[in-house]
Image (cartoon, rainbow, N blue to C red):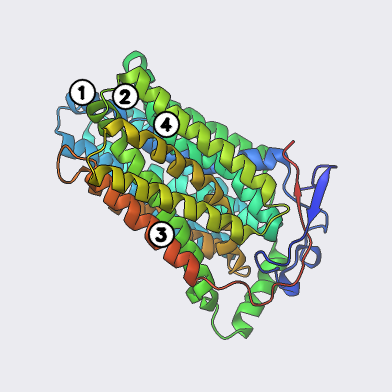
Amino acid sequence: MPAAPDTATVANPTTAAPRPASAAPASSGLSAGEGITAALLGVLGLLSAIAPLATDLYLPAFPQMAQDLTTGATSIQLTLTAFLLGVTAGQLVFGPLSDRFGRMPPLIAGAALMVVAGIATVAAPTVGVLVAARLLQGLGGAAGMVIGRAIISDRATGTAAASAFSLMMIVGGVAPVIAPVLGGVLVEPLGWRGILGIVVALSVVMLVAILAVVRESYPASRRVADRAERLASGSPLRALRSRRFLGYSATFAFSFAVMMAYISASPFLYQDMMGLDETAYGLAFGANALGLMVVSGASAKLATTHDVRRLLAIGIGLTLAASLAVGLLVAFAAPTGWLALPLFVAVSSLGLVFGNATALALGAVPLAAGVGSAVLGAFQFGLAALVSPLVSIGGATAAPLAITMVACAGIAAIALALAPRAADASPAPASVARAG
């Protein structure tokens, strides 16, 4: 779709590799000036946020759900596990489909599936029906996440892609942080079915926005050309095994695991250990979310003029340092309230990580953006599902949280160090519409 009139063209020889000429938009059915408008970026942000909202918004309603459905906490927990499994599997399904059939058909199908499955969750008479509906809801929601990333990769490269991903992460990255707070406020007046009804309403908005704003970014002519180039290279999936893709994907996934560890432990940490009431907990949670938003916005601006990998390295370094500070405070039995500052730094610093790591990872697989986005997303949510329960091991102590954060941040730093720069880092112009 045509870019906004005030399109910014940027180039940086030290960022992600340019797209091969055979896959360039200008020669494959997209106009040379086509980029990412503010409206499109807003819709893609919603696509990235819908699954985290559907995951975390109803968490405060778990006790009410168990009572209404006459079941135990373990059965209710299965509704969350089923959704995460659906999101993980859905990305592996819809990503390759979008490479084969274009972005729009699977994107619309996934959004429609999420609406229908969402209606089933609201009307579920038993926990078994609810678990099945949540599995299908996660499967459909995954389409927006994985294809949204691929659309940005189709339309922008290098610094422009990093800027667009960072802006998108303002919405997608903050959603899992603020969703539990919103759920806690809404659960009493609306009930758990009302909260799941909000998810359905957001899914309908997502479907309408897709139909109104999003246009095909990977037309048939380009799919044919890319398929021929992949076949000529001898191994269509060779790039997915490269150190660049795996390194940046691991950097992204383990950094996201740091945030998921914080989110999972935060109710116990802030309310039980620090003694905050629900209002104060919401304010502390909101402050960290605001920090993440501000840094993500700053990263989007800086990515247009600075080395994307260097920005990523700074973000990883700050996250690791803050995680180590949490570990030291716990090890030396410092007052629990002191943990608030390093936690704020750790969460906020991820604003320099998410968008830039995504751009560099997908920049390593320009001929398979859909599959690459699928692997990246499955890695992200699969690891998050494994990490979240770890922070509750050991009882009334913050040690599991500290150990998990340090381990994940350390692995992210190692993965970044092992990821080589692009071999062919020649300047390549890339355009993205200014959000403002």
Q: Nearer the viewer, mark 2 or mark 3?
A: 3
Disc 4: CA contacts within 10 A as few (<14), some (14-19) or many (>=20): many
Could you tell whether 385 is left or right of 425 in the image? left
Label 2 sits on residue: 192
Q: Quadrant of residue 65?
A: top left
Q: Nearer the viewer, mark 4 or mark 1?
A: 4
**In the rendering, at what x and y percent does residue 251 appear?**
46, 60
Q: Amino acid at mark 2?
A: Trp
Q: Earlier in the sequence, mark 2 or mark 4?
A: 4
Looking at the image, can residue 116 be seen?
no
Q: What SS does tag 3 mark?
A: helix
In the picture, the disc for residue 179 is 4
Q: Nearer the viewer, mark 2 or mark 4?
A: 4
Using the image as rendered, state which of residue 380 and residue 135 is in the foreground: 380
**In the rendering, at what x and y percent does residue 244 appear?**
53, 71
Looking at the image, can residue 3 be seen?
yes
Eyeballing the image, is 310 above or below 53? below
Disc 2: CA contacts within 10 A as few (<14), some (14-19) or many (>=20): many
In the picture, the disc for residue 68 is 1
**In the rendering, at what x and y percent does residue 173 appear?**
50, 42
Q: What SS does tag 1 mark?
A: helix
Q: CA distance from mark 3 to mark 1?
A: 34 Å
Q: Amino acid at mark 4?
A: Ala
Using the image as rendered, state which of residue 406 and residue 266 is in the foreground: 406
Q: Amino acid at mark 3?
A: Phe
Cβ–Cβ under 8 Å for marks 1 and 2:
yes
Using the image as rendered, state which of residue 248 and residue 379 is in the foreground: 248
